[in-house]
Image: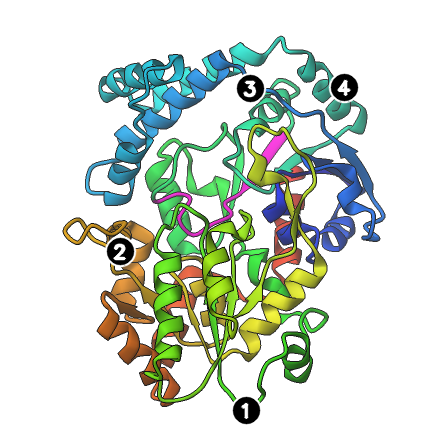
């Protein structure tokens, strides 16, 4: 049997591949499984994984490495900007106006890659990026680990963090196969380039496979396997979550009132406090047709400080602050070091199971809610004309334009529509069951149950090629 290395890049990868049954399934398919962790080793102590865990030395990205990474990413955006609003918008957002070395380097990257952005050029930039760190001391430790563990395939649980680029380089030099999991529904259609080149790719669905072939045109379909996503697998596993009476008791809810579950994005979504305060005012001013339990979950990617004024003003709001703890400081991508607890996963699943409907600003939690057949309201008031943060522009992003076309959620663009949508659902008039189901079928190409097993089995097949 072959030997598998699993690269846990961040807290999301930890949730998807450690809190699930994936490691158990991987051990059934490989002679040995070694976890190569970009998180501190201590985060695994409470889990009986029964496999070797190696904490990787942190890669410190210097300017020259950052520059070639940046030019590679901007070239990818330039290459695919035609007819893709999300990529066009990312080109605008990523541009730097600062008069700093990185600002000037970004200006040059935009100018240069406007002309030189083919896949051949991108691969040249990738080689230059690799050359820039090839002699760094951290590479010696990576080579030593990979060689000593005698790995046959290296599985990356996220394809984008820049600090995994040295590991990809080491695998290439040692001629070890690599596979990457595409971890989010928008990563191909609107985000920057992957951290490097991989031999194989695990995707959610036929839709994502087609996006892979479109945005990475040197990849062929034999390198791609549709497996679904482990992100939602705990939702069909009975060992996660708990009954409604426990939820009511834990969050001190009124069991006779509907539960409205408001979930927040990180600070890049500037209007979350606006919509939450408006919803709270609906309650204060008695505009809702029923009294409700309002439960608010803040983003696990940040501290909830921007909601403090709302929390102090509206004491009836019940807060669910995600239990994602920063396990390492002074990291080049600090958010990656936030690690979820098992209790947090249980809370999230239980809130989704037992809420009456969800409100969120176009985040992936829309999919989570649809899996439990829960109606969703997506408020987007901001546009170029009204002075608010323009969140309506995201409706033109490829992955969200499909949500609009599906008519699976209630997308509301002003206060009146928002109030009417909330009351519509409180009246139990939900009429989008079929649309939600169809949208989930489009996004998730395989059943939720058995996702970890499918991934492990596919990795074994590739390892044996």
Q: Where is residue 103 in the image (x, y as percent from the top left)?
A: 35, 18
Residue shown at the point (81%, 50%) measured from the top left: 49
**Badge 4: few (under 14), some or many (20 or more) residues near its Cα, within 10 Å?**
few
Residue to which mark 2 is pinned:
395
Residue 331: quarter of image: top right
Residue 291 location (% of width, % of height): 44, 86
Of badges 2 and 1, the one in the foreground is 1
Whichever of callouts 3 and 1 sits on the residue coming sooner in the sequence is: 3
Image quarter where the N terminus lies is top right
Q: Label 4 belongs to which residue?
A: 144
Residue 165, visible in the rendered structure: yes
Could you give the CA–CA distance between mark 2 and mark 3, rounded to whole angstroms? 34 Å
Instruction: Work out whether 67 lies above or below 261.
Output: above
Q: Where is residue 266 shown, x and y percent of the image?
A: 46, 49
Work out which residue is located at the far top of the displayed protein and give it.
135
Of helix, strand and loop, which mostly describes the magenta segment?
loop
Relative placement, left or right, of 6 versus 95 is right
* Residue that extends furthest to the left in the rendered view of this protein: 385
Residue in the picture at 24% in, 55% down: 382
Q: Is residue 362 visible?
A: no
Judged from the image, the secondary structure of the residue bearing numbered disc 3 is: loop
Q: Give the range drawn in magenta.
A: 177-189
**Which of disc 3 and disc 2 is earlier in sequence?**
3
């Amino acid at each position: 049997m072959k030997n598998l290395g699993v690269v846990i890049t961040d807290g999301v990868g930890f949730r998807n591949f450690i809190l699930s049954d994936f490691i158990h399934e991987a051990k059934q398919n490989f002679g040995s499984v070694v976890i190569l962790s970009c998180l501190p080793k201590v985060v695994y102590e409470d889990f009986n994984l029964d496999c070797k865990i190696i904490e990787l030395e942190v890669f410190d990205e210097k300017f020259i490495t950052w520059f070639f990474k940046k030019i590679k990413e901007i070239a990818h955006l330039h290459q695919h900007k035609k007819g893709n609003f999300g990529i066009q918008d990312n080109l605008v957002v990523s541009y730097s106006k600062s008069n700093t070395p990185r600002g000037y380097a970004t200006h040059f990257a935009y100018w240069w890659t406007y002309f030189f952005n083919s896949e051949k050029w991108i691969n040249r930039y990738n080689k230059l990026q690799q050359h820039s760190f090839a002699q760094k001391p951290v590479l010696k430790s990576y080579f030593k680990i990979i060689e000593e563990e005698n790995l046959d395939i290296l599985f990356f649980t996220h394809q984008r963090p820049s600090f995994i680029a040295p590991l990809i380089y080491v695998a290439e030099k040692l001629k070890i196969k690599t596979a990457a999991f595409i971890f989010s529904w928008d990563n191909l259609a609107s985000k920057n380039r992957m951290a490097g080149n991989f031999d194989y790719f695990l995707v959610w669905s036929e839709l994502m496979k087609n996006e892979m072939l479109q945005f990475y045109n040197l990849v062929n379909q034999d390198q791609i396997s549709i497996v679904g996503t482990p992100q939602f697998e705990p939702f069909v596993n009975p060992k996660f979550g708990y009954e409604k009476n426990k939820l009511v008791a834990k969050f001190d809810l009124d069991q006779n009132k509907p539960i409205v579950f408001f979930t927040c994005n990180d600070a890049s979504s500037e209007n979350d406090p606006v919509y939450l305060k408006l919803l709270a005012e609906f309650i204060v001013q008695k505009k809702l047709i029923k009294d409700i339990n309002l439960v608010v979950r803040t983003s696990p990617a940040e501290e909830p400080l921007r909601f403090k004024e709302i929390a102090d003003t509206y004491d009836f709001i019940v807060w669910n602050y995600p239990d994602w703890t920063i396990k390492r400081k002074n990291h080049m991508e600090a958010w990656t070091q936030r690690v979820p607890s098992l209790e947090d996963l249980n809370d999230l699943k239980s809130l989704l199971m037992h809420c009456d409907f969800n409100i969120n600003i176009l985040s992936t939690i829309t999919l989570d809610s649809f899996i439990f057949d829960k109606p969703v309201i997506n408020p987007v008031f901001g546009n170029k004309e009204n002075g608010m943060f323009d969140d309506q522009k995201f409706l033109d992003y490829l992955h969200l334009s499909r949500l609009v076309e599906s008519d699976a959620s209630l997308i509301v663009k002003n206060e009146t529509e928002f109030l009417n949508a909330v009351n519509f659902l409180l009246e139990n008039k939900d009429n989008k069951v079929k649309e939600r189901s169809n949208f989930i079928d489009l996004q998730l190409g395989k059943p939720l149950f058995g996702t970890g097993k499918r991934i492990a089995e596919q990795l074994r097949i590739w390892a044996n090629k």
